[in-house]
Amino acid sequence: MSEIKIQIKNLFKIFGKNPKSALEKVKNGVNKDELLEKHNHVLGLKDINLDIKEKSIQVVMGLSGSGKSTLIRHINRLIEPTDGSVVVDGDDVLKMNDESLRNFRRTKTAMVFQRFALLPHKTVLENTKFGLHIQNIDEKESDIRARRWIDRVGLSGYEEKYPQHLSGGMQQRVGLARALTNDGEILLMDEAFSALDPLIRKDMQDILLELQDELHKTVVFITHDLDEALKIGDRIAILKDGIMDQEGIPADILLSPKTQYVKDFVEDVNRARVIKAKHIMSKLNGQNRDNAMLVDQDDFIDRFIDKVISEKPSCLIVKNKHNDEIGYLSTKRLSEILKR
Amino acid sequence: MEDFLSEFPELSRETLRFIKKGFDASYRAFSREYGDTIEAVFDPVLYFLVWFEKLLQNSPWPIVLICFLAVIYFGSRKISVTIGSLFAFLLIGIFGMWEDTMSTVSIIGVCTMLSIGIGIPVGVLMAKSERAQRICTPILDVMQTMPSFVYLIPVVMLLGIGKIPGLLAVVIYAIPPIIRLTNLGIREVDKEVLEAADAFGANPRQKLFQVQLPLALPTIFAGINQTIMMALAMVVIASMIGVKGLGQPVLKAITNQYFAMGLFNGLAIVALAIIFDRVSQSFGHRIQQHRSGSRE
């Protein structure tokens, strides 16, 4: 499939006075609570391995204190790891010197923050241009680029306002425009929508998905909200206490949670809204297909469930974009999925 | 035993005298050796101060007054402050204190410029380095609490009596707030905003000039305001070592018990203080208007 853009390997992060010696203990099996109690060190991340595919949205999910914000800060090295490696496009981020790290941050990545982190003394336009300004890009050009993205996130007319005069949702649009103006291939979003009202959050999620359809960035998205994770994630990694519990496509995580923690997490999710036909279909194998109903592979269950109930087909045939039949789904399987 | 408890055990009188004498002698030797060099270092400042004072005193008073009012208006953007200042200056002139006031304004102006020029870089250094903060904090404590007469002594021994020692004494007394508040303002900058600057690849210089200093500006301005006020308060004491201005008549009034003279000149200092304060405060407010409320 697509190439791996970001490769995180055996990443450890320990906070404290002497992380190196604590690292040995963690590698020898000391757990988080014991490390804190006996050795006064905080285990941030433990042996994280994660391959993030190019042009996909990788969600990292976990409750507060799970280490998800720590993890995302390792990708652009706002935090130094205690051990491990982070490789982006074949370059080890941790081996870069100050100059090349700055270059990497300027051109490859852009970040959106939970509490927006806008500069209060600069206007919306100046904030949006900030990344380009740092790179000493010509004023005229950065103006054009910034205005394009301000327009794209729906803030035309607000260019000369100050962040304080905008609502939270609008401020985060500025944050998004600032990140997009930088035009890096990697977009790091640290709980970018968590501080927003539910309705505005949904808006922002839609904007992000819409933009992603056209821009195909590699997005790392941190959230504590499972619905959000399922909605926007191509893949989801679940962190708990600095350990990665499970990583996979949303449907896999819903259908086969590996640990109790993940199970608890996904229990109350409305599956019909998350699972697509392609996730639960089986191979076409000469099954009886009288009175079959055709569904698109990318349709969520709740797109076709009403029709299934009213038309009562004997089974469903799954097709792809080019109308090729690619899979089979029995109504029995469908009802099992929904019942659990 | 009883002696020991009732009297604090102290060094003998001879030893103490020896220590003090030795200290004084070595400082005297130092000032004899280096006094001229150090004085020469301050020559440019002296020239500037004298030039500025002469400019204010020798220009026709209406022009000086109009310039002042223009600065006050553009600094504060308040008609009320401007008109109030006009009356204050007119009264000062009518009561025969115009020349002294010009001297005071010139020395306060130069002291403020020096304090800003030295204080902000030192404050930045303190904010950037823990070690610098550990070294500077006790020095600032001493500068603020040491009775000002005490450090007048070595300054006078070193440079004699005159404008420069007075200037130095005022700066030493007035500079701590601006250093402290620059340090504080930079340290208080929102960590997430700094992180954002890092994430977009800002180098330390860009962070300082585009994020930290602008965000610290309101706090720095509070420091500048404090510095000006303290400089004004020091004017009277500095007049003891030959700084001309409103302080000298006050000093004369104290020694001769001229109450009215002391009162007039004292009120002139108060008027200057209020004008400086209002102008610098409303200027400070204006530069941070993006923080709240509407823009003009």
Image: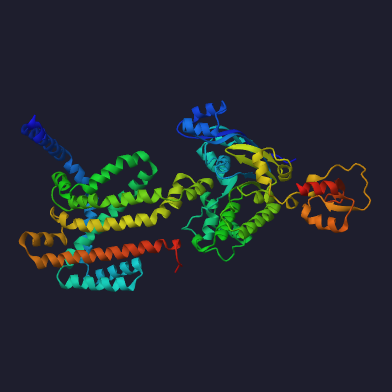
Q: Which one is in front, A338 or A22?
A: A338
Would you identify the image quadrant in which residue A260 lies?
Answer: top right
- In this rendering, the answer to whether A4 lies above or below B166 is above
Question: Where does residue A278 sit, x and y in percent of width and height?
Answer: 80, 47
Q: Residue at x 86, y 42 (%)?
A: A283
- In this rendering, the answer to whether A264 lies above or below A27 is below
Q: Which one is in front, A111 or A229?
A: A229
**Total marks placed:** 0
Q: Residue at x 13, y 54 (%)?
A: B242
Is residue A148 among the parts visible in the rendering?
Answer: no
Would you identify the image quadrant in which residue A44 lies?
Answer: top right
Residue B231 is left or right of residue A29, and the answer is left
Q: Which one is in front, A97 or B288?
A: B288
Residue A59 is left or right of residue A334, and the answer is left
- In this rendering, the answer to whether B258 lies above or below B4 is below
Question: Where does residue B194 sit, x and y in percent of width and height?
Answer: 47, 48
Q: Which one is in front, B252 or A340?
A: A340
Would you identify the image quadrant in which residue A254 lies?
Answer: top right
Question: Where does residue A339 sit, x and y in percent of width and height?
Answer: 77, 48
